[in-house]
Amino acid sequence: MGASLKDVAARAGVSVRTVSNVVNDFPLVAPETRRRVRQALEELQYRPNAAARQLRAGRSGLIGLVIPEIDSPYFGELASLLVQEAQEHSWTLLVDQTDGDPDRERRLLDDMQGQIVDGLIMSPWSLSPADLRRRADAVPLVLLGEQDAAGLIDHVSVDSVAAAADATRHLIELGRRRIAAVGVQPHLVNGTAEQRVTGYRQALDAAGIPRDPALEVPVTALHRADGARAMRWLLEEGHAPDAVFCFSDQLALGALREALEHGLAVPGDLAVCGFDDIEDGRYATPSLTTIAPDKPEIAGQALSCLADRLRRPARGAAPEEPRPARRIVAAHRLVVRESTAGRRAATRA
């Protein structure tokens, strides 16, 4: 057991209240008394109970993070960055996953607010804007991803329309004309697939390339196996493309593997581009061209939104007016690697 305030007070010959005033850096303590208390604190190696102090202040120091898939490389990397950012605020991150199930998303959204979390960061796949509006407004909430926050909730995202257009335009500039889009998900309402297929179509239209509905391939999930199945379908059903834009790097890695098993040369016969810039893509053979969202910016902006919502006015100051919801668009960039440019032309990134 560590030393208590009572132990320190006995050593310094003062009251427990005086020790508390010194620990909390209150000004109304005589210099000599403050010196004696600090000496006693050091001699007894007193460590304040951070959890108890936070609870007394009406804060738990806990932030909830609700994501669709913990084992997703993209969400895993993002969660790691959020943990690091949370530490800068002396917060601890509690993580749970939903598998994109609407009932679980709704339950975690409600349950998290009933727990001792100061704020919540969530990436919903299945909840609609109407679902989010019906939530009990108990704790600050920040949305991640392309879900429409309807201007009511702080929201950090990437411009997926522009990013998808950048990826497709890159493939067009390489001379590709039969460009498949793998990752259409009509069963979800989070907006990710819808925005990415919109950007893909915009780039085709701008280049005067006719759209082929057969080249827009739906998937159940964004995993490697789904990408492999989509590529197999394209190749075996007579819809072989000369390039493929996949809505996640996991899809792209699956598609890449299936193409190689069918004897295609990448990028000679087929150029492949993903989205997310996960670590696996950098070390694939060939390395994967991708859209790289600025994940550190996403994590930093999400925690900054929560910090702003949780900041209290100075003692004696008038309460602040509620801040309007923020819509923050993080940067993205196209990273060209071997799967579209070949070994010599690929950039090192």
Image (cartoon, grey):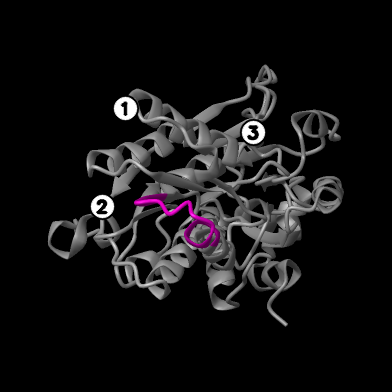
Residue under circle 1?
207
The answer to whether residue 159 is seen in the rendering is: no
Q: Callout 1, which amino acid?
A: Ala
Residue under circle 2?
336
Q: How many marks?
A: 3
Task: Judge by depth and name the residue closer to the eye, 309 or 20.
Answer: 309
Disc 2 and disc 3: Cα gap in Å?
Answer: 39 Å
Crowd rating for badge 3 (residues with CA inside 10 Å; few <14, some 14–19, many 20+): some
Q: Callout 3, which amino acid?
A: Arg
Task: Judge by depth and name the residue closer to the eye, 212 or 333.
Answer: 212
Residue at disc 1, secondary structure? loop
Residue under circle 3?
309
Q: Position of residue 218 (x, y in %)?
A: 61, 49
- Which is more foreground, mark 1 or mark 3? 1
- Which is more foreground, mark 2 or mark 1? 1
Crowd rating for badge 2 (residues with CA inside 10 Å; few <14, some 14–19, many 20+): many
Figure check: 99 above or below 304 = below
Disc 2 and disc 1: Cα gap in Å?
Answer: 20 Å
Q: Position of residue 1 (x, y in %)?
A: 73, 82
Image quadrant of residue 91?
A: bottom right
Per the image, is 344 magenta? Answer: no
Figure check: 75 above or below 292 = below
Q: Tell me: 73 left or right of 274.
A: right
